Amino acid sequence: MKTKRTKLNRGQVLATVVEGTGRNKEDVAHKAGYSRSAYYKHIENPTLDYHILMAYGKAIRYDFTEEFPDMPKYIVEEPGDNYSKPVTLEDAIQLLEKWKDKYLELLEKYNQVIEERITKK
C-alpha cells in the first residue's frame, strides 16, 4: 500500500524559515524585493510561486529545494558575493573578515614581489 505524501504549505515553510533566521521580517521582505504586506500575503499562500520562494531564498541564503525538490535550482550566494549591503551584524562581520583576509593575502603577495625586486638589484 502506498502512503500518500502530503504537500507542504509553501507559505508556512517560508514563514518557518524566516522565523528561524531571527531576522526582521520587513528587512527580509525588502531584501527579497517585496513589501512587508506582500510578505504576510506570501506566508498565507499554500501554493506560493517558486520564483517568490527563490527571491526569499537568495535574500536569506537558504535553499528551499530541500523542502521542494521539484523547485528549480538556484544559487545561494555567500555574504558579499554580490557587493550588497549587509542586512545583519553577522553578515557585516563575515564581510569584514572576507575583505580583511583578501587584503592581507594581497599585501603578502605585494611584499614578496618587492623583496624579489630588492634582492635582484
Image (cartoon, helix red, strand yellow):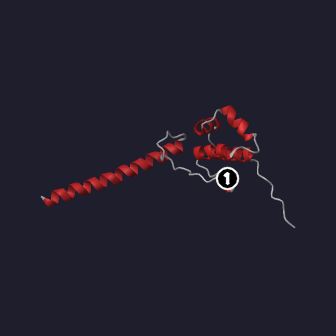
Which residue is under mark 1?
Answer: 71
**Residue 48 point in image, percent of width and height:** 72, 43
Which percent across, then down, holds residue 94?
48, 48
Q: Quadrant of residue 45?
A: top right
**Residue plotted at (46% across, 46% down):** 95
The one of 41 and 104 positioned closer to us in this rendering: 41
Quadrant of the drawing holding the C terminus? bottom left
In percent of the image, x 36 and y 49: which residue is there? 103
Residue drawn at x 53%, y 45% is 90
Which residue appears farthest toward the bottom when viewing the image?
Answer: 1
In the displayed structure, does residue 64 sit left or right of residue 5? Answer: left
Residue 40 occupies which quadrant of the picture? top right
Q: Position of residue 27 (x, y in %)?
A: 60, 36
* Residue plotted at (49% across, 43% down): 92
Badge 1: how crowded within 10 Å, few (<14), some, or many (20+)?
Answer: some
Using residue 119 as the reference point, say whether residue 26 is left or right of it.
Answer: right
| Image position of 114 (left or right of 94) | left
> Which residue type does callout 1 highlight?
Met
- Camera-side residue: 93 or 76? 76
Q: In the drawing, does residue 102 fall left or right of residue 47?
A: left
Residue 95 position (above or below residue 41):
below
The quarter of the rendered structure image containing the N terminus is: bottom right
